[in-house]
Every structure is written in C-alpha cells, then in structure tokens.
Image (cartoon, rainbow, N blue to C red):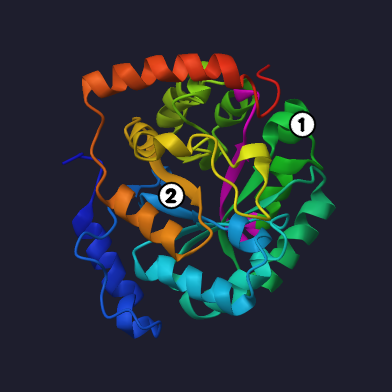
Amino acid sequence: MDPRINRRGFLAGAAAAGWGLAAGTGAAALPALGLPQRLLGRTGYQTSTLALGMAPIGMGGHTPAEAERLVNEAIDLGVNYIDVAPNYANAEEKLGPVMQRRRQGVFLVTKVESQQKPQILDQIRNSLRLLKTDHVDAVHLHNLGDFKLDEVLQDPNGGLTALQEAKRLGYLRFIGISGHLRPWKFAGAIATGQIDLVMTAINFVDRHTYNFEETILPLARQHGTAVVAMKVLGGARGMVYNQPTPALLADHYESAIRYALGLTGISAVVLGLRDTNEIRQAVKTVGQYRPLSRGELAALTAQGKQLAKTIGPHFGPVV
C-alpha cells in the first residue's frame, strides 16, 4: 500500500461526519473499497484522494435538485473535498443547500479572480452567502499566472493581503493559489511561506510543457504547502463545461489518474464530474489506485512527450 494513503483515517472520518444512511441521502453504507485519504499539507486535514470539481454541475444546466443529488452522492461515496468558484455559473448556489446540512464533513474551497482587496472581500462574502456557510476552508487566488506577482504578493491592497484579512475576519482558514500557466509565479508565491494550498494543472502530457511537477512540488514539500492536481485529464476539449465534452486525455483515463496520484506531494486529484456515471467511475478508479510500474511510467512518459508536441501550451504562456 502507498504509505501516504490512510484508509483507517478515512473510515473514521466518514463515521464522524455521519456519511451514509445517517446523512439522509438513501445510501445504506460506504462502498467496501472506500476512498483513501492523504494529508493535505500543513492544514492537517485528511482529504479524500478524489476531490469534486463543481464546474460541470454548475455550468451544465443541472436543476438544483439534480445538483444536490449528485453532490450528496459524491459525499456518500467518500469525497470530502469540494472545489467551486463564483465563475462556475450558479455552482455555489447549487452547492449551498448541501453545505447547509453537511458542511462539517467537507473541506470546502472557492476562488477569487480580482486582485484588489475590496472586490476580493466582497466576492468572498457573496460566496459565503450562496454557500450557506459562515466560512470556507480555503480560497484560491485564481489564475495566478495572469497577474503581476509583485502586485499580488506585496501590494497592501492586493490579493495576498486581502486573503490574510479575510482569514483574520474568519471567512477562511487557509490561503491558496490556483491556475494553469507560468509555473514560476507559483514558485515565487510558495517561497513566501504564506501559501497553504496550491491547485494547478498536472498531467503526464503537460509535464513536458508547463512542468509544474519539477517547478513547484519540491518547493511545496519544503514549505509544507499542500498540492492538489487539476486538469489531470487535460481539461475538457476547448475548455467547454456547459455541455458534455470529452476530456483531452479521456483515452488515458486510468493511466492519467495513476500518474498524478503517484507524484510525491500530491494530496488529491480534482475532477470535474457531471453525472452519476462519472462520479462512480472516478470513485472506482481512484479507490483502486495503484502506482504505475517503472515500465508503465516510462511508456507513459514517452507517450506524453509525443502528445505534448502536438497539443502544445494549450493553457496559455509557459513563461
């Protein structure tokens, strides 16, 4: 068993959170396999290795009842980390009724994209209202690669100062950064020692283009900063989430997930899941995770290099 995985902690956490029949969602019990857990860096939280990304549910035309059913199903199956954002259409509003009842069992993360303190604080307050909670666990400064790093980190009216103020006010517990491009900016932010959590694009193809793996993972370990991987499947083709759209690396589904979870320092993979089939497929795949063998990794690395030449920097600039 991978030493970073804690199944006993998962089962204990599930019982404490009241998942299953006690949650009132019709699930008699968690699956026998369950979802493993890993430590989420210096936050001290034991996160399920599968995190639910809310973009497809928020942007996919689901009714509030459908969205509520899907989120409850994910939680019942062991997911205890949920990622949402104000720009995922009405995802926060759809998530609110679930959080009203099950907030204690979930590590809840949202995002801000403004870089000015008043707007950031207003956006967080609005997110809390929609999510029906008095605090979230973390807020990401999203699309970090698109902003001037010195302004984000040093401006007294900028992003980092705003999140520090929001933390002081009790709106959030941990400060995060997220994005898809310019990994050197993430390294600069982590080096300040002020970043608790990073979510960034990590997959076996983009390693050969953006290479967040070698740029930020060692530095994050040094600072105790948690890292969760997004775009593990390359993202939806054309970044389209308002309709069923295959992921760029959908043909490599299992291998791509195993690659990301096999990287030292990755706590979880965030997958955008649209329906029951996708949720159950993800839970099964992540729950059955086993590291890639040396031969499998070598073959996937070679394949990734070739695909990277064709796909290129599809998220935007590298530097």
Is residue 176 rendered magenta in the image? yes
In magenta stretch: residue 36:
no
How far across and down, in percent of the image, does residue 106 sit?
A: 45, 65
Residue 169 showing in the rendered view: no
Question: What is the crowding at mark 1: few (fewer than 14 residues within 10 Å), some, or many (at least 20)?
Answer: some
* Nearest to N terminus: mark 2 or mark 1: 2
Q: Answer left or right for 218 relative to 191.
A: left
In this rendering, the answer to whether 17 lies above or below 52 is: below
CB contact under 8 Å: marks 2 and 1: no
Q: Residue at x 82, y 45 (%)?
A: 116
Mark number displayed over residue 147: 1
* Residue wearing tag 2: 43
Magenta region: which residues?
167-183
What is the quadrant of the C terminus in the image?
Answer: top right
**Disc 2 to disc 1, C-alpha distance:** 26 Å
Measuring from the top left, give residue 2's x and y in whole percent.
20, 39
Q: Residue at x 60, y 53 (%)?
A: 244
Q: Is residue 234 above or below residue 309?
A: below
Q: Amino acid at mark 2?
A: Thr
